[in-house]
């Protein structure tokens, strides 16, 4: 077994037998992975972290070749994001982000850019007054990085440019032109400002996206569109979405 060390954000934990915990992490160097921490429930001082969801830790683990479950031998807390935990709304948003990450990314597929987006989201949730904006930006960036991103450059079916009113199809994952619109009875108009905002978020760095001013109609449309898109393509509604 190889011994590995990496930064890791706790997605969730499960009790295992009488004394242990299984934790799901999103790591900087190995992507999403699961590890078992033996004896932690019997002796909480065995690890320098209580593995709270969406906390940042440094973990040491023995990498298994035959199982997706790795043995975690060390876990040190780096940031518990206490300002997020002191606000119920921010707790719900951070929990939604963790469930989204678990649903979007395949196990053990390194994606350091996604790790940075998740970490930046949690850091800025601690300080901003508009936490919903942070989560919308994170969703758009994580969808792109996971390969799930909606298609906004042209008609998703025929690839023709779209002029005039734009209409979005959750079913096909993008915009449809007037000739293809009949293919989805659930298609709905979308504001040009919403499309422009999404494109800006996709191509810009994190700090630049935070300066983007999202008008209330665009913010509301973004949330609605992303919710429908995720529900259709994940074939389920995320459990934490109902708290939002």
Image: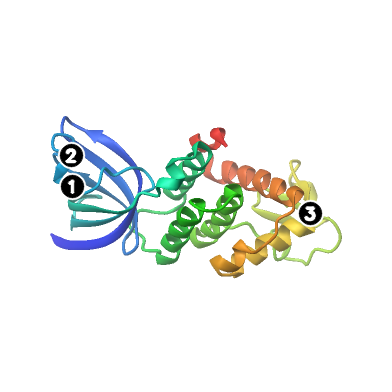
Marks 2 and 1, how far apart at CA: 6 Å
Give the mark nearer the N terminus: 1 vs 3: 1
Q: Is residue 209 left or right of residue 9?
A: right
Q: Nearer the viewer, mark 1 or mark 3?
A: 1
Q: Against 69, is 159 above or below? A: below
Density class for disc 3 (Cα within 10 Å; few <14, some 14-19, many ≥20) is: some
Residue placed at 18% from the left, 35% from the top?
Answer: 41
Residue 161: x, y in percent? 78, 67
State the mark number for residue 44.
Answer: 2
In depth, the one of 132 and 158 nearer the eye is 132
- Element under disc 2: helix
In depth, the one of 69 and 182 nearer the eye is 69
Give residue 164's quadrant in the image: bottom right
Q: Residue furthest top?
A: 18
Residue denoted by label 1: 47
- Element under disc 1: loop
Residue denoted by label 3: 191
Q: Nearer the viewer, mark 2 or mark 3?
A: 2
Residue 45: x, y in percent? 15, 43
Residue placed at 31% from the left, 40% from the top?
Answer: 13
């Amino acid at each position: 077994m190889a011994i590995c060390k990496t930064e890791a954000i706790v997605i969730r934990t499960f009790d295992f037998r009488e004394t242990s915990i299984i934790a799901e992490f999103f790591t900087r160097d190995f992507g999403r992975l699961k590890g078992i921490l033996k004896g932690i429930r019997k002796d909480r001082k065995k690890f320098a972290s209580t593995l709270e969801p969406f906390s940042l830790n440094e973990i040491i683990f023995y990498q298994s070749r035959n199982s997706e479950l790795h043995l975690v031998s060390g876990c040190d807390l780096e940031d518990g994001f206490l300002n997020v935990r002191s606000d119920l709304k921010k707790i719900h948003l951070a929990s939604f982000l963790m469930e989204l990450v678990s649903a979007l990314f395949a196990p053990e597929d390194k994606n350091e850019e996604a790790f940075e987006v998740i970490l930046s989201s949690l850091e800025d949730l601690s300080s901003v007054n508009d936490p919903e904006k942070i989560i919308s930006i994170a969703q758009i960036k994580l969808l792109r990085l996971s390969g799930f991103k909606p298609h906004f450059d042209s008609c998703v079916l025929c690839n023709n440019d779209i002029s005039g009113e734009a209409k979005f199809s959750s079913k096909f994952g993008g915009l449809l032109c007037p000739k293809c619109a009949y293919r989805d009875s659930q298609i709905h108009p979308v504001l040009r400002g919403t499309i422009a905002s999404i494109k800006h978020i996709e191509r810009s760095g994190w700090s630049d996206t935070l300066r983007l001013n999202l008008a209330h109609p665009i913010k509301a449309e973004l949330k609605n569109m992303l919710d429908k898109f995720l529900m259709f393509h994940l074939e389920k509604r995320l459990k934490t979405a109902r708290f939002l």
